[in-house]
Image: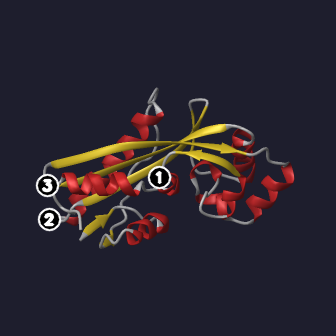
Amino acid sequence: MVVLASQSPRRAELLKQIGIPFKILPVDIDESPLSDESAQNYVLRLAQEKSQRGWIIAQGDEPVLGADTVVVIDDQILGKPQSQSDSIRMLTLLSGHTHRVLTAVAVTIAERQVSCIVTSLVRFALLTDQQMHDYWLSGEPADKAGSYAIQGLGGQFVEHINGSYSGIVGLPLFETKQLLNEIGYFHER
């Protein structure tokens, strides 16, 4: 069994999709970016801290998986929107442009931690003010990095992706399985 240090229903669903047995152990860490911290360093640090914190709390012998996802455009990290106006601001930045989605995954077991970052490119269509307003009213963007969910209504805005769809959703499946294999826990079937 793997311990998932996340409350994300999307990450749980992705683990189920590839048949990895898991239990959920939400962890609370400070997710504030450090001054002058790059998006890559930020997302990796959060995934590693979640995994490490989960390992300490779980006090077991099962691997603990932590992950974090950020949306980045023009070197600006777009977190979860704080309000409707913040959501509209983010969607306006993404409208008609290509942005990066970085998802970091870390697995901790005993004194060992392995991790990786998966970067995907996402191209948005041009959005109208009405589309952005209606999307906010759907409730979907309120708790999503970059103010959209590719696996939900937000998928209608995506013209093209280059990279890992599951990574954009929140957990790159291929790389996650590789990390579990690397620590000797989850072997090929």
Please give the residue where the numbered disc 3 appears in the rendered image. 110
Please give the residue where the numbered disc 1 appears in the rendered image. 167
On the rendered image, what quadrant is the C terminus found in? bottom left
Task: Tell me which label, 3 or 2, sits earlier in the chain.
Answer: 2
Q: Which mark is residue 179?
A: none
Where does residue 36 sit, x and y in percent of width and height?
46, 26
Task: Tell me which label, 3 or 1, sits earlier in the chain.
Answer: 3
Please give the residue where the numbered disc 2 appears in the rendered image. 61
Secondary structure, mark 1, is helix
In the figure, 135 relative to 69: above or below? Answer: below
In the figure, 130 relative to 18: above or below? Answer: above
Q: Are marks 3 and 2 in contact (CB under 8 Å)?
A: yes
Where does residue 157 sit, x and y in percent of width and height?
72, 53
Circle 3: residue type = Ala
Where does residue 184 sit, x and y in percent of width and height?
15, 57
Residue placed furthest toward the front: 189
Task: Tell me the residue at 61%/57% (across/down).
Answer: 150
Does 75 sit left or right of 154 as displayed? left
Secondary structure, mark 2, is loop
Characterize the local packing of mark 3: few (<14), some (14-19) or many (20 or more) Cα atoms within 10 angstroms: some
Task: Tell me the residue at 66%/43% (across/down).
Answer: 123
Q: How many marks?
A: 3
Q: Are marks 3 and 1 in contact (CB under 8 Å)?
A: no
Circle 1: residue type = Gly
Does 184 sit left or right of 176 as displayed? left
Cα gap from disc 1 to disc 2, whole angstroms: 27 Å
Q: Nearer the viewer, mark 1 or mark 2?
A: 1
